[in-house]
Amino acid sequence: MSELRWHPLLEEWVTVAPWRQDRTYHPAADHCPLCPTRPGKEETEIPEPDYHIAVFENKFPSYTGDQGRCEVVCYTPVHDSSLGEQSVDHIQDLIEVWRDRTVELGKLPNVRYVFVFENRGEVIGVTLSHPHGQIYAYPFVPPVIQRELAAEARHMRKTGRCLYCDVIDGERDGERTVLRDDWWIAFVPAFARWPYEVHLAPTRHRGGLIDFDEADDESFARTLKGLLQKYDRLFEMRLPYVMAMHQRPPGTGAKHHHFHIEFYPPNRSRDKLKYLAGSELGAGAFILDARAEDTAAELRAIQ
Amino acid sequence: MPTKRRLKKRVVIKPDGRYLIYYEKTPDARETI
């Protein structure tokens, strides 16, 4: 089990899991643990010769047992592929998997938050290149989500409205919009902290994956694919990113939360990265050398 | 209106005790999750 240590100055938990030091590190493609097991070859994490979508408990978990869970979500059996290269229909299946895991993990007695995310690209720290995401079921509400929930609750008390609905309403002129349809919008928020940061969200108030209807699912899959295709065409390479789903915590509370996904690509150009350094890490103050309006126009123009 | 189920799931336990879930596409597998 991990050790949870309290940071008294920041008032947040630090999770200590030393065994993760030994996790699988950049295996050769023919030794990928997320590929199906090929006849006559060594067994991978998935012992069958093919699969559609597979989920398993992380071999090197940050949370396990009574603390929570860490799961790996294998998007596809195809090694050299990506989330954005999947069909809209396949992404809709994936949404169903994310929803199912959210419900199941949210039922565990000590789980306070289910976080669906993807780290993509070596510069992000990815150690397995096979297309996959992760799900962490935390024994606490993580600090970024806590801050969001608190801000949303204050806004609701003050105005009677959803904070994020107001943020989306502020995007009506389309200057920072990357793409949208009748149900979902992708935009570079005015307050972006990364040059090509994008938020993807339903335009109707929805708290989490379990609140979506058929139209939400279909539009979500289509806009997610559309955004990821734009990302990969931006510099004509598979753009690294962190994809972070912010959904409401399990249970019936937090009605004021609005589901959205935040994407943080670290690139500020094809070959230059934005690093978190003194101001960002030491003081928590992001300095951005790009305007959201300009990067949104750039992304919007990509067909 | 809630979403319809598109997948069925099959859970297996690995030799080290971890679970592995296959989500499989079956046209008539609605409501199976």
Image (cartoon, helix red, strand yellow):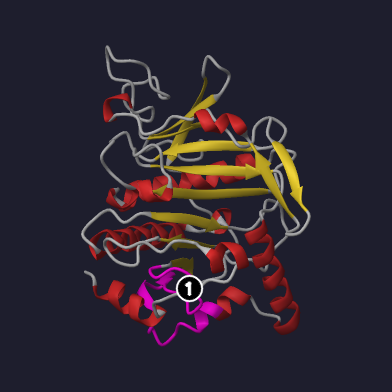
Image quadrant where one finds the C terminus of chain A: bottom left
Which quadrant would residue A125 be assigned to in this image? top left
Name the residue located 54 percent from the left edge and 65 percent from the top edge: A278
Task: Tell me if A44 is positioned left or right of A99 in this view.
Answer: left
Q: Residue furthest right?
A: A8
x, y (%) of residue A40?
27, 11
Q: Which residue lies furthest to the bottom in this view?
A: A173
Give the main secondary structure of the magenta stretch: loop
Task: Describe the element under mark 1 as helix, strand or loop.
Answer: loop
Name the residue located 73 percent from the left edge and 41 percent from the top edge: A4
Number of marks: 1
A226 or A80, which lies in front?
A: A80
| Residue B33 visible in the snapshot | no
Mark 1 lies on residue: A192
Task: Tell me if A172 is positioned left or right of A14 in this view.
Answer: left
x, y (%) of residue A41?
29, 15
Task: Tell me if A151 is positioned left or right of A135 in this view.
Answer: right
Q: Give the range drawn in magenta.
A: A167-196
Q: In this view, does A296 lie above or below A13?
A: below
x, y (%) of residue B5?
47, 44
x, y (%) of residue A151?
68, 72
**Chain under callout 1:** A
Name the residue located 38 percent from the left edge and 82 percent from the top edge: A293
B14 or A190, which lies in front?
A: A190
Image quadrant where one finds the N terminus of chain A: top right
Q: Is residue A98 magenta?
A: no
| Residue A269 visible in the snapshot | yes
Which quadrant would residue A103 be assigned to in this image? top right
A289 or A225, which lies in front?
A: A289
